[in-house]
Amino acid sequence: MDPEPFERLLANPEKQIDETVEHPSYNLVCRQSLYSLPEERQFVGIFMNITSQKKNQSQLDTLREQTIIQARELLEQQIRMAETIASALGENAARAESLMEHLMEQAKRE
């Protein structure tokens, strides 16, 4: 454990320290609240293990990023499909128009 936050309290006893600290050697992430009791000449440290919450948040962030990527891919695919369908419809309409004009010319001749 790093004594530095307690040294800061010693320098400024009126201060309260609230911070999130990683302890890699213990594979822990802690939320720590530190304050001094000047009359008793003591320090109080409350340490809350938030390792699992941080891990869950990280997994949720990854899932969100993947969801956004997949949503973009789906949107791009939908746009390409719409463009393909529009092109096919345009070609079909042009071909139908040409055939109808040809049929009408044939009908006029006869």
Image: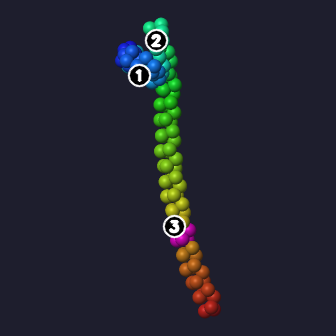
Q: Which residues are magenta?
A: 88-92
What's the mark number on residue 22?
1
Number of other residues with Cα within 10 Å of mark 2, as a class: few under 14, some 14 to 19, many 20 or more: few
Q: Look at label 1 and name its amino acid.
A: Glu
> Callout 2: helix, strand or loop?
loop
Viewer-closest of 29 and 95: 29
What's the mark number on residue 87?
3
Residue holding disc 2: 38
- Measured in 3D between alpha carbons, the distance from the residue under mark 1 to the one under mark 2, in whole angstroms, is 28 Å
Specify the principal SS of the magenta part.
helix
The residue shown at (52%, 52%) is 75
- The answer, for residue 21, to whether it is visible in the render is yes
4 within the magenta span: no
Number of other residues with Cα within 10 Å of mark 1, as a class: few under 14, some 14 to 19, many 20 or more: some
Q: Look at label 2 and name its amino acid.
A: Pro
Residue 86: x %, y % from top left: 54, 66
Residue 99: x %, y % from top left: 57, 79
What's the mark number on residue 47?
none
Residue 79: x %, y % from top left: 51, 58
Horizontal side of residue 5 vs 79, given as left or right: left
Viewer-closest of 43 and 38: 38
The residue shown at (45%, 24%) is 19
The reply to whether dot 1 and dot 3 touch (C-beta < 8 Å) is no
91 within the magenta span: yes
Q: In front: mark 1 or mark 2? A: 2
